Each structure stands twice: as structure tokens, then as C-alpha cells.
Amino acid sequence: MRTQVVASRLLAFSVAAPLLFSLPRLARADQLGAEFQVNTYTTGPEVHPSVASDSSGRFVVVWERRFQDMVSSHPLGIYGQRFDSSGSPLGGEFRVNSYTTFPPTGSSRTEVKVGSDAAGNFVVVWTGEYQDTGSTEGISARRFDSNGAPLGNEFRVNSYTTNSQSFAEVKLNPVNGDFIVVWRSFTQDGDAGGVYAQRYASSGSPQGSNFRVNTYTTHGQKLPSVAYDGTGRFVIVWGSDYNGTGNYLIFGQRYASNGSPLGGEFLASSLLPTINPFPQVAANSAGDFVVAWIASDFALNATDPFKIYARRYASTGAALGSEFRVNTYTTYDQGYPAVAVSSGGNFIVTWSKNAFGVGPGIQAQRYASSGAPIGCEF
């Protein structure tokens, strides 16, 4: 069975989720037309899409494709397609990666992500295998201007190249175009893995060096996500194996616009640790933010093992209530959440639902700024 990249536009928020993309417009959930295919090249599978939009509603989708630009047994390429606010393509699809040499062995994971500023300039990051000397995986990035023209070749983000670096994510400061990349670095902090980050100016110049995000370094930390507010402050969340059992809870750390930590790391989740929590965070211009993740109690409830949870925070970092369950459909797996927050504090969470015997689908739930659900999941 082959795969392709499909998109659906909503009059709502800017959300990146598996096969669901939406635009920052009105606080409604009306679809703007039917879902549509993003990719034009259709030979071989297209997987792992990511989306980002600018302040005018233009958006860019990037994805991983195999068997187009390389001839090894695990060929990988990163591709993209830009769209205007009406959903019409802006030019044709384009290849993101400039480095195309891969050996005949290796895994097939790239974990591509894209971030955009308000003007439409965007940055793409991915895990580039065997490109780093001395490591099996490293974090690559490439910058593009608002017209989709590349601003130089791809470049390596991680300075530590021993073992592997993976699960990268990038976000741009919507005001000035500065950006930050976060990733997991295996064994760099002396244990199973830590969360690291690198800040950049809008010109692409590094702002300082790679730095470790997590202060608790025992066992492993992974799957980071990052969000900016309108003043350049940012927050990073990740999964932490807090007790060495291979189960992860969600922790976070806030930062000032100059990269200085604001307080210490904090615990976002206290219930239902899981193997792969895939946390996601989104903030609005005022600095209020929402964290969403996968929680699990498979051993206790085999017919409802994986659930979507979320928690709201004020711009001060104070929790606005406890964590809460997002999904109302409770049979079988729910996974891969994404979240976006409007300027007024309304927010939306999307996720993948596996309806047993039917297959996966994309669900969403809207919320008011108070945290009250708006309607039902759809």
C-alpha cells in the first residue's frame, strides 16, 4: 500500500498533525473545501508531513519521500510544497535537502519538521543519517525565504556528533524571524539521552552554543517540542523517564527571549506515564501555552490503552488547572497529538484515532480560553 500527503484546511488555528493541516483564520471549525493531495510526484511513499503558516494564511508542507533522488537501498529525500491562503499551490514541489549521498544501509527515519515566521520565511529540520562524521544521525536544517528560495545549503545543527541526534523540531519567532531547533542527543548528558537546543538569529547565525534543556539527567529524556510567544520568550517540553522503567512523564522549561531559563523545569503530567508520549506545545502572542501528549494505562485497560491529555498554562508559567483528557472516543489507540492556541486563548488539539477494524483517522477538539470544550470532537 502506498502513501501520499493529504491536507485539509479549517477556519481555525495553525496546527501540524499527521495528515491534517489548518490555517490561522477565524475561531470556527468550518472546512474550507475538501481535503486535497499535496504531493505531485506519486511514485514511492510520502510520509511524515509537517506544516507551518504565516500571518497572511500562506502555508508550506514538507514531507519525507523515498526512491526519487537517491539510489541506495534506503533512499530518503525531503520535499516541500508552498500554498497561498486560498489553498492554491505556489509553484511546484521542491526538494529541501541539498545533501543526497546516503550509504546502502541504515534506517529510514528522517523526522522532518518545518517552522515559519509571520512574513513567510521558513526553516526545515530533519535527521540526516550518516552525514555527520562519527555519528549515525545528526540534525540538519535549511532556511528559505518567503518566496520559497533557499538561503544557502543545509547545515548541521548539533555540535556534539557522537552516537545519534534525532527527533528535531524547529520554531520561528513570529516577530523577528529568529529561530530555535530542539532535539534529543543520545548519551550526550552521560545517560540514555538528553534534550538539547540551539538558538539562531534570523540571518541563520547561531546565538550562543548548543545547550542542554533538561536539568534532571538520570535515565532518558526525548521527544522535545518548542513554542515561541509574541515577545521572543519560548517554552520547551519533553518526555522524561523519571524512574528508569521506560515510561515517560512530561516536563517543561520556560526561557526568556535572551535564552535565560525562567525558573526551573516543571512537571506537566502526573498521571499515566507512557513509552512514547509525543508531547507538543503551542503558545499565543501573550505567552499563554498549552501542552498535549499521549498517556497510557495499557496494563489496566487494554481496550482504551492510549489517550490524549492536555494542560493549560498562563504566561507566567502557572498551571491553569489540572491535566485533562481530550478525546471522548475511548476505544483503541489515540496518538500523535498537535495543538495550536489563538491570540485570545482559544485552542485546538488534533490527534490520530485508530478505530479498530476501520483504520486511523484524524480527530480534533476545540476549546474556549477557559478550557471548556467547544462542541464535540470531530
Image (tube, grey):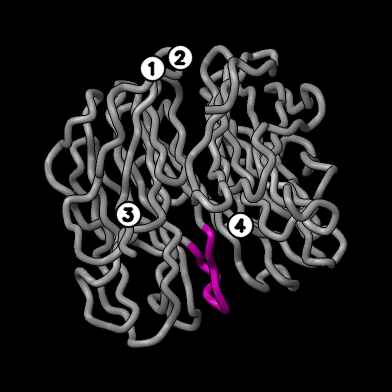
Q: Is residue 323 above or below residue 265?
A: above
**Residue type, label 4:** Tyr
Label 4 packing within 10 angstroms: few (<14), some (14-19), many (20+) = many
Q: Which residue does the image show at 41% across and 55% down from the upper left?
A: 48
**Going from the N terminus, do you reach mark 3 or mark 2 first?**
2
Q: Are marks 1 and 2 in contact (CB under 8 Å)?
A: yes
Per the image, the residue denoted by label 2 is 28
Question: Which portion, as a residue range, is magenta?
Answer: 158-167
Viewer-proximal residue, 332 or 23?
332
Label 1 packing within 10 angstroms: few (<14), some (14-19), many (20+) = some
Q: Position of residue 305 (x, y in %)?
A: 73, 51
Q: CA distance from mark 1 to mark 2?
A: 8 Å
Q: Which residue does the image show at 17% across and 36% down from the upper left?
A: 89
**Residue type, label 1:** Arg
**Going from the N terminus, do you reach mark 4 or mark 3 first?**
3
Q: CA distance from mark 1 to mark 3?
A: 28 Å
**Residue type, label 3:** Arg
